[in-house]
């Protein structure tokens, strides 16, 4: 079984069968991660570069761990302290790296479309680890994996994404992927953090958590960035927490458990109260483990394509 | 040219005097000698067969960026006017966002002189002077000196004249002369950081959007200022249904405003951006189908006066970067006639006469360079074949830059030849 594309640039347009193949493959890899010896050989002899033009800790470590578990050779490239700061273009950086015979590139970049651009200038398989406000497909997949594991199926599952939808690549990947798998997706947040015509993506839009919580099985809470307030998109973090913070008080008003996801890192007591983050319905640490399994699955499946 | 040439059996369309008939035109020493149903060729007279072709007063592209002085790696006045000649234009108006900006009479003179030296001066280069010094929107440029030196309009194009107070004074000052203020309508804080049309496609692609109101609030303000100052005002590259509606209303109230649209804004929508092809990035951005439909209606009913290309050359390296980093703009001179005939005439939006109005009569009137095709007049003509079918190959462009989203497009309509200042320029790529 192979994926339709030799790159993973986003979940927009990825078929139901391909998503299912990735999630099913990840089940096998998660088993391996729970064994005493966690390393398997499928990518032996393959070289992968992690091109991180934006700071990242957990995504980069998760990818690197997944790569090493699959026995790939790994090279890490971070923008700070590199030739990028000397004015080298993405194209030249990528071509230079490819001249070193790299098989796969994992890229994170502040510009939407950077991963697409890379596919035009290098021959390696490209995996998007987050491009601007566009997509973060492996995050979407790991969220879906976590939800599928918890609920058995994504079909008919009701998921609300809460927070800064405008600037979130996690939101977009979740919307596209979950909808393809038959889930019902809604979004909730301040109107200034909703991209124009988001409803045309087939999601219901809410501006009050109390309206949407009774209608969902899970919430995926996005990190709110301090600089959005400075940019005049909402008045203050205090107000944000009071009106859009996911708290146990709000969740308890609904008389059944709602699963809580968060892509991390959490601003405790801003978008998510500490007791919810650490509470019984939080799937946040599961997400982290599943992230490695899902990334192993993606790397493995793309490694099969030529 | 040799001293006599006979254009045989072309369809002469000159909306300025209502001419639309098949004629022979004899040109001697650059002057139209005879226009008649049949003119016998004299001995030694060259003949250009024009059956099925349109002979029109010379087309002018009133919105181009020739990049000289300052950005000669993108385009020079020589390469830009050669592209214009191949595209069927006998004149271009070049915008002042050069380095230095065209904000001083010496730069006006430099641009004019480069134009006269380029391609034997067959394409008139009419500079547009800056409204403000350095185009930075603060201090008024020496408008009287610019106009006296030959600037045909005033604009800070590439940027808007943002401050309403400065715009008011510039309009009042410019109204002492018969020149328009040409505005790039963009409310900067509203458009800030945007790279494409704000809406469903931008939301899907995660690209920062430029809302249509960024254009419309400034156009609305400017229309009010034009009414207040009674100045002549021309809105560059309108791109939204809202702008078309504002212009229609302004014209109904007899306010002295005109506007232009680019071929890409009546041809493409923001769906094209989905490929992240940086040749779909321009400012104003490609809009939606509803906007394209409104623009076509505005062209049809006369709300939109002019088709101008906003020819904006950028080098391959400059465009070969990620979408957000890429500069705005595409080249347009060599595809304008093809796109206009294909999208507007073939679809019944415009008649050929209206097309000639939008490419020649109207822009010439706006910039004060009106001409008429008549015996005794200088031959300033564009000959084009509205039924010539061809495929765009950007590598063949004569512009120094090849940044166009139309590579591979099948078009109908192509320039055959231009005449100006006693010279003839034949498009050897034309075969009809």
Image (cartoon, coloured by chain):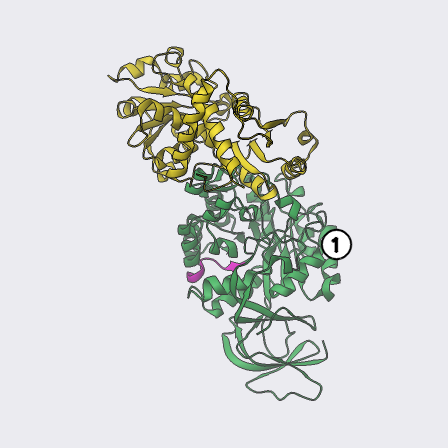
Chain colours: A yellow, B green
Residue A103, above or below B261: above
The chain letter for the residue carrying disc 1 is B
Residue A258, horizontal then vertical, whole percent: 31, 19
Residue A66, horizontal then vertical, whole percent: 52, 25
Residue A202, above or below B16: above
Residue B226, above or below B356: above
Q: Does the magenta stretch include residue B346?
A: no
Quarter holding the C terminus of chain B is: bottom right
Q: Residue at x 60, y 54 (%)?
A: B331
Q: Is residue A194 left or right of residue B114?
A: left
Residue B90, horizontal then vertical, whole percent: 63, 65
Q: Which residue is drawn at 47% across and 26% down?
A: A232
Hey, which quadrant is residue B303 in on the image?
bottom left
| Residue bounds of the magenta highlight | B299-307
Q: How many labels does the image show?
A: 1
Quarter holding the N terminus of chain B is: bottom right
Mark 1 surroundings within 10 Å by alpha-carbon count, few (fewer than 14), some (14 through 19), many (20 or more): some
Q: Is residue A30 left or right of residue B326?
A: left
Is residue B381 visible from the viewing direction of this image? no
Q: Residue at x 53, y 23 (%)?
A: A69
Q: Which of B371 and A191 is in front in this view?
A: A191
Is residue B86 visible from the viewing direction of this image? yes
Q: Name the residue under label 1.
A: B110
Q: Is residue B306 magenta?
A: yes
Q: Could you tell me which secondary element the residue under label 1 belongs to?
A: helix
Q: Nearer the viewer, residue B418 or B306?
A: B418
Residue B415, horizontal then vertical, whole percent: 59, 68
């Amino acid at each position: 079984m192979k994926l339709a594309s030799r790159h993973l640039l986003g979940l927009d347009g990825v078929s139901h069968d391909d998503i299912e193949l990735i999630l099913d493959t990840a089940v096998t890899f998660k088993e391996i991660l729970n064994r005493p010896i966690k390393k398997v050989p499928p990518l032996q002899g393959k070289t992968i570069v992690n091109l991180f033009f934006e700071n990242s800790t957990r995504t980069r470590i998760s990818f690197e761990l997944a790569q090493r578990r699959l026995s790939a050779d790994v090279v890490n490239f971070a923008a700070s302290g590199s030739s990028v700061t000397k004015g080298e273009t993405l194209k030249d950086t990528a071509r230079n790296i490819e001249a070193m015979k790299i098989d796969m590139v994992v890229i994170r970049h502040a510009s939407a479309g950077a991963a697409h651009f890379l596919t035009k200038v290098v021959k390696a398989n490209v995996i998007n680890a987050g491009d601007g406000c566009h997509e973060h497909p492996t995050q979407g997949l790991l969220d879906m994996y976590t939800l599928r594991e918890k609920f058995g199926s994504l079909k008919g599952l009701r998921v609300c994404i809460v927070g800064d939808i405008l600037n979130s690549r996690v939101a977009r990947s979740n919307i596209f992927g979950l909808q393809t798998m038959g889930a019902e997706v809604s979004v909730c947040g301040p109107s200034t953090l909703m991209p124009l015509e988001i409803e045309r993506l087939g999601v219901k839009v809410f501006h009050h958590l109390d309206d949407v919580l009774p209608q969902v099985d899970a919430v995926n809470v996005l990190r709110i960035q301090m600089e959005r307030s400075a940019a005049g998109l909402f008045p203050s973090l205090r107000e944000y927490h009071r009106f859009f913070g996911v708290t146990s008080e709000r969740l308890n008003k609904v008389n059944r458990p709602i699963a809580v996801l968060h892509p991390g890192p959490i601003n405790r007591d801003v978008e998510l109260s500490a007791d919810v983050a650490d509470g019984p319905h939080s799937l946040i640490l599961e997400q982290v483990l599943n992230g490695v399994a899902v990334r192993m699955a993606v790397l493995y499946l793309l490694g099969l394509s030529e | 040219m040799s001293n006599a040439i006979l254009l045989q059996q072309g369809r002469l369309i000159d909306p300025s005097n209502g001419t639309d008939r098949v004629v022979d035109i004899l040109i001697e020493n650059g002057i139209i000698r005879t226009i008649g149903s049949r003119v016998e060729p004299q001995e030694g007279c060259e003949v250009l067969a024009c059956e099925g072709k349109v002979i029109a007063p010379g087309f002018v592209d009133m919105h181009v960026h020739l990049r000289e002085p300052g950005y000669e790696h993108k385009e020079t006045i020589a390469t830009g006017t050669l592209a214009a000649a191949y595209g069927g234009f006998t004149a271009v108006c070049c915008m002042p966002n050069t380095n230095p900006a065209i904000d001083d009479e010496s730069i006006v003179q430099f641009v004019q002189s480069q134009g006269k030296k380029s391609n034997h001066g067959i394409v008139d280069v009419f500079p547009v002077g800056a409204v403000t010094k350095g185009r930075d929107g603060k201090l008024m440029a020496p408008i009287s000196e610019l106009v006296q030196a030959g600037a045909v309009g005033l604009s800070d194009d590439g940027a808007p004249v943002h401050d309403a107070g400065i715009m008011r004074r510039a309009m009042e000052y410019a109204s002492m002369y018969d020149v328009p203020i040409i505005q790039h309508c963009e409310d900067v804080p509203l458009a800030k950081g945007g790279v494409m049309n704000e809406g469903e496609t931008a939301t899907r692609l995660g690209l920062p959007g430029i809302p249509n109101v960024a254009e419309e609030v400034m156009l609305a303000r400017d229309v009010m200022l034009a009414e207040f100052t009674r100045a002549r005002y021309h809105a560059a590259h309108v791109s939204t249904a809202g702008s078309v509606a504002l212009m229609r209303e302004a014209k109904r109230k007899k306010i002295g405003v005109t506007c232009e649209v680019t071929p890409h804004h009546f041809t493409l929508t923001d769906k094209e951006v989905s490929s992240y092809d940086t040749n779909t990035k321009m400012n104003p951005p490609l809009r939606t189908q509803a906007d394209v439909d409104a623009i076509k209606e505005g062209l049809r009913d006369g709300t939109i006066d002019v088709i101008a290309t906003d020819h904006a050359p950028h080098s391959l390296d400059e465009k070969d970067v990620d979408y957000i980093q890429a500069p705005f703009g595409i080249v347009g001179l060599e595809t304008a006639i093809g796109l206009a005939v294909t999208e507007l005439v073939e679809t019944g939006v415009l008649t050929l006469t209206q097309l000639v109005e939008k490419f020649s009569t109207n822009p010439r009137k706006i910039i004060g360079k009106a001409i008429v095709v008549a015996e005794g007049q200088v031959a300033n003509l564009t000959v084009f074949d509205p039924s010539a079918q061809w495929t765009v190959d950007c590598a063949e462009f004569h512009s120094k830059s090849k940044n166009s989203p139309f590579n591979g497009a099948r078009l109908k309509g192509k320039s055959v030849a231009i005449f100006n200042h006693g010279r003839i320029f034949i498009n050897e790529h034309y075969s009809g």
